Amino acid sequence: MLMGVREDAQVDLAREYEVYQYVPYGDRWASYFYRRVLERKENALFALRAILS
C-alpha cells in the first residue's frame, strides 16, 4: 500500500486482499521523499499533515 491511499480505502482493500504498507526507511529515506515531492508538490502537504496530526 503506497502512502497517500485513503485510510478507508486501505481498510476496504484489506478486507478482501492481503495488503502491505510501504514505508521507506534507512539511510536514503530523505532522498526518496525529496524525489516524491519533486514529482508531485502535494506530497509535501500530505507529509506535513501526517506529521502534525
Image (cartoon, helix red, strand yellow):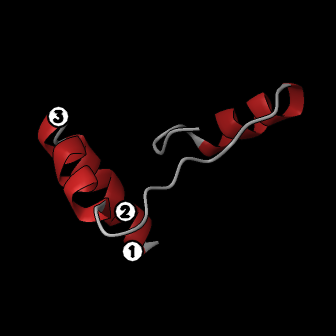
- Residue sitting at x 31%, y 69%: 27
Query: Is 21 positioned to the left or the right of 47 in the image?
Result: right
Q: CA distance from mark 2 to mark 3?
A: 18 Å
Query: Is 6 positioned to the left or the right of 32 in the image?
Result: right
Q: Nearer the viewer, residue 1 or 49?
A: 1
The answer to whether mark 3 and mark 1 are in CB contact below 8 A is no
Asked which secondary structure carries label 3, the reply is helix
Q: Is residue 7 above or below residue 19?
A: below
Query: Is 38 positioned to the left or the right of 42 in the image?
Result: left
> Quadrant of residue 28 in the image?
bottom left
In the picture as drawn, the residue positioned furthest to the right comes out as: 15
> Quadrant of residue 12 in the image?
top right
Three-letter amino acid code at the position of disc 2: Arg
Residue matched to label 3: 39
Query: Is 29 positioned to the left or the right of 40 in the image?
Result: right
- Residue sitting at x 16%, y 42%: 41
> How many circles with numbers are drawn on the protein?
3
Q: CA distance from mark 2 to mark 1?
A: 5 Å
Q: Is residue 44 above or below residue 35?
A: below
The answer to whether mark 2 and mark 1 are in CB contact below 8 A is yes
Asked which secondary structure carries label 2, the reply is helix
- Residue sitting at x 87%, y 32%: 15
Locate the N terminus by quadrant. Answer: top right
Which numbered tag is attached to residue 49? 2
> Quadrant of residue 30 in the image?
bottom left
Asked which secondary structure carries label 1, the reply is helix
Residue matched to label 1: 52
